[in-house]
Amino acid sequence: MIELLLRFLIGGAVVSLFAVLGDTVKPESLGGIFAAAPTIALATVVITLHERGAAYVALEGRSMMAGAAAFFVYACAVSWVMMRRRVSALPTATVLLLVWAGVAATLWAVWLRG
C-alpha cells in the first residue's frame, strides 16, 4: 500500500514538473516531449532500488532501454507509413505493432536473455 502511495506521489510530482517545463519550451510542439516522460517507471525504479538493490535495477534498466528502442523503431515505422500512404491511423498502428514485437523479441534474444 505504501509502495503504491509513493509511486502516486513521486509520479504526480514528476508529471507536474514536466508539464511546467513543457509549457515553457518554445516552440510548443516540443513541449509534448516533456509530457511523455515515463514518470511512473522512474518512481518504480527508485522504489525498486530501495527494495531490491542496484543489480536488479540495472537489469530492469536494460529491459527498459530495449523496450524504448523497440518503441522508437515502431514509432518511426508508423510515421513513415502514415506520411507516405493514405491509410487510416488505427489499422496502421495496430498492424505495425508486429514491428515493435519483432524488435523487442530480437533485442531480448540478443541482448537480454543471457
Image (tube, helix red, strand yellow):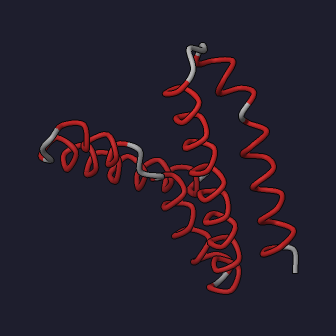
Q: Position of residue 71 (x, y in %)?
A: 61, 49
Residue 74's place in the image compared with 93, above or below, is below
Q: Position of residue 109 (x, y in %)?
A: 87, 68
Q: Position of residue 66 (x, y in %)?
A: 67, 64
Q: Quadrant of residue 104?
A: bottom right
Residue 13 vs residue 70, the one in the foreground: 70
The answer to whether residue 58 is left or right of residue 106 is left
Q: Nearer the viewer, residue 77 or 32?
A: 77
Q: Position of residue 87 (x, y in %)?
A: 60, 15
- Residue 35 quadrant: top left
Q: Nearer the viewer, residue 97 or 5?
A: 97
Say if 33 sits above or below 107 in the image: above
Looking at the image, residue 46 sits to the left or right of residue 32; the answer is: right
Residue at image position (79%, 46%) is 101
Considering the image in quadrants, where does the C terminus appear?
bottom right
- What residue is rendered at 56% in x and 67% in y? 45
Q: Residue at x 87, y 74 (%)?
A: 113
What residue appears at the point 74 percent right and 43 percent down from the top-left corner? 99
